[in-house]
Image (cartoon, rainbow, N blue to C red):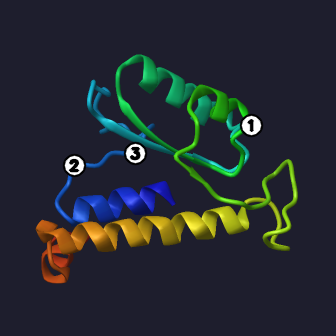
Amino acid sequence: MLKALAMRLMQIGLDAYVVGETTTPSVEKGDLLIAASASGETSSVCMTVQSAKKQGADLVVISASSESTLGKIQTPDITISSATKFSTSDASIQPLGSLFEQMLLIVFDAAILEMSQEDKGSNDDMAKRHASLE
């Protein structure tokens, strides 16, 4: 879901990178890291958030668990009530993080829609930035 968000951010004309990709530059003070983990226990996400925080990056954390390791590093900005790989939820019968992932896509889609209407780029401009080597 975060790669989908990065793609849309690029399509509206913003610089966006995905942690772990070879073309991702160093994080700097003032950069924004958006991190998501349903359980809040994904070690790579926790380590990345901790490192970005130490380096002065701004953070947006999304999780289903504010009482998790991730939640102790940075209080989630958005909490999505859903099951995780460690727990079930009354919010849905869907297993594991399915609902969490679906809600991430909806939250990200809504954010991009709002941002794209702020003169960042029309659908035509976004289409011009869409991948052409497919």
Q: Is residue 117 visible?
A: yes
Q: Which residue in the structure is indicated by mark 1?
A: 67
Q: Identity of the amino acid at label 2?
A: Asp
Q: Identity of the amino acid at label 3?
A: Val
- Secondary structure type for disc 1: loop
Q: Residues within 10 Å of mark 2 (few under 14, many from 20)?
A: few
Q: Is residue 132 visible?
A: no
State yes or no: discs 2 and 1 in contact (Cβ < 8 Å): no
For the point 59% across and 68% down, which residue is it? 103
Q: Earlier in the sequence, mark 3 or mark 1?
A: 3
Q: Residue furthest bottom?
A: 124
Residue 18 percent across, percent down from the top left: 40, 45
Q: CA distance from mark 3 to mark 1?
A: 26 Å
Residue 124 percent across, percent down from the top left: 14, 82
Left or right, 122 with reference to 69: left
Residue 80 percent across, percent down from the top left: 65, 58
- Secondary structure type for disc 3: loop
For the point 17% across and 69% down, which residue is it? 118
Q: Which residue in the structure is indicated by mark 3?
A: 18
Q: Identity of the amino acid at label 1?
A: Glu
Q: Earlier in the sequence, mark 2 or mark 1?
A: 2
Q: Which residue in the structure is indicated by mark 2?
A: 15
